[in-house]
Image (spheres, rainbow, N blue to C red):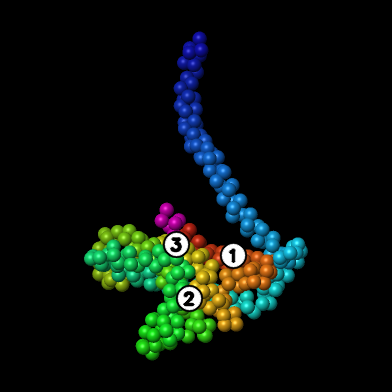
Amino acid sequence: MIAEIARRIDIGPLRRDASLLDRQRRPQTRHGFYVLLLLPALLLLVALLATPAVYIVWLSFQKSTLGQEPAFVGLANYGALIADSAFWRAVWNTFAVVNVIVYGELAFGLAVAVLLRRVEIGRKLIIAAIIAPYAITESSGIVMWRFMMEPDVGIASRLLDGLGLVLPWDSEPWAGLALACLIAIWHHMPFTFLILYAALLSVPKETQEAAAIDGATAWQRFWRVEVPIIMPAILVAILFRYIFAIRLFGEVWLLTRGGPARLTEVLAIYLYRETFQYRNFGLASAAGVCMLLLSLLIALPYLYRMAKEVRRGA
């Protein structure tokens, strides 16, 4: 009886529609299941990142030191930062040093990657030599450079003296920061090099050959064909190095300890002094918040450009 009724009202299309709806709902159900599986890890990640960040922001509005209960002081810590000439000196030093390091690494790493791509013999050995500094711990590398650059006794210092070049890094603030930049570029350039070298190897040879047939010179093929293709990799390298370079500490601390007269301090050393030497936790937290905002301010244009490149490639 039921089969006869179904045949008469022709429920076949309804079954097909139900089957189609079921297939459409199935991915959403799976997506929800995957989110449920990832939820504990996401909650743990948010707790580990958000809890210290919220605490630092809260502490930046407090007057806090060892042995005393924090007391709310509003924006007094930020006002003290604005009035502190040492803070502005650290901001300027950080801005100058970070830009020299990031763009120095980018130029040097890109040049090495372009040249190495044309090398046929011993390429693996050269790559191993290039990335070797990345295998050395940061403090060991800095101490090694310091010994080599010791005035009058270091090997590199004697060599520079023989060439008529003097780098008074232990007495002149600009020379101390310049040596810190040189060490940072030497130590972290392999990171930028590997990203750019991999990107250059992914450029299709057909594209370069087509540009050569059209009469483009080697420079035009590099600047107008290869650079636009590897631009996402360049942006990634710049963004990552900005994020890490703005926390620069070891190179300056082990060379000059921020001296003479705090003239070579960067933001990380300023924060360290306020926290561990002066025990001014509220002011140090305010400096940390300023470092975070400065990082976001620097990263935003590159994130926007990366999103634009991704949309263009999609």
- x and y percentages locating residue 4 in the rendered image: 48, 12
Name the residue beneath numbered marker 3.
Answer: 236
Name the residue beneath numbered marker 1.
Answer: 292
The alpha-carbon separation of the residues under discs 2 and 1 comes to 22 Å
Contact flag, marks 2 and 1 (Cβ < 8 Å): no
The alpha-carbon separation of the residues under discs 3 and 1 comes to 19 Å
- Say which label, 2 or 1, has the lower sequence index: 2
Question: On the picture, is 114 further left or further right than 106?
Answer: left
Q: What element carries label 1?
A: helix
- x and y percentages locating residue 154 in the rendered image: 41, 82
Q: In this view, does 165 lie above or below 188?
A: below
Q: Which region shows up in magenta?
A: 309-314
Q: What residue type is labelled 1?
A: Leu
Total marks shown come to 3
Contact flag, marks 3 and 1 (Cβ < 8 Å): no
Residue drawn at point x = 66 percent, y = 77 percent: 84
- x and y percentages locating residue 295 in the rendered image: 56, 66
Question: On the picture, is 45 further left or further right than 216?
Answer: right
Residue drawn at point x = 59 percent, y = 67 percent: 291
Question: On the picture, is 68 further left or further right than 295?
Answer: right
Q: Is mark 3 on a helix, strand or loop?
A: helix
* Label drawn at residue 180: 2
Residue 311 lies within the magenta run = yes
Find the residue positioned furthest to the front: 153
Picture quarter containing residue 282?
A: bottom right
Picture quarter containing residue 51?
A: bottom right
The alpha-carbon separation of the residues under discs 3 and 2 comes to 23 Å
Viewer-nearest of labels 2 and 1? 2
Foreground: 3 or 286? 286
Viewer-nearest of labels 3 and 1? 1
Foreground: 173 or 203? 173
Find the residue positioned furthest to the bottom: 164
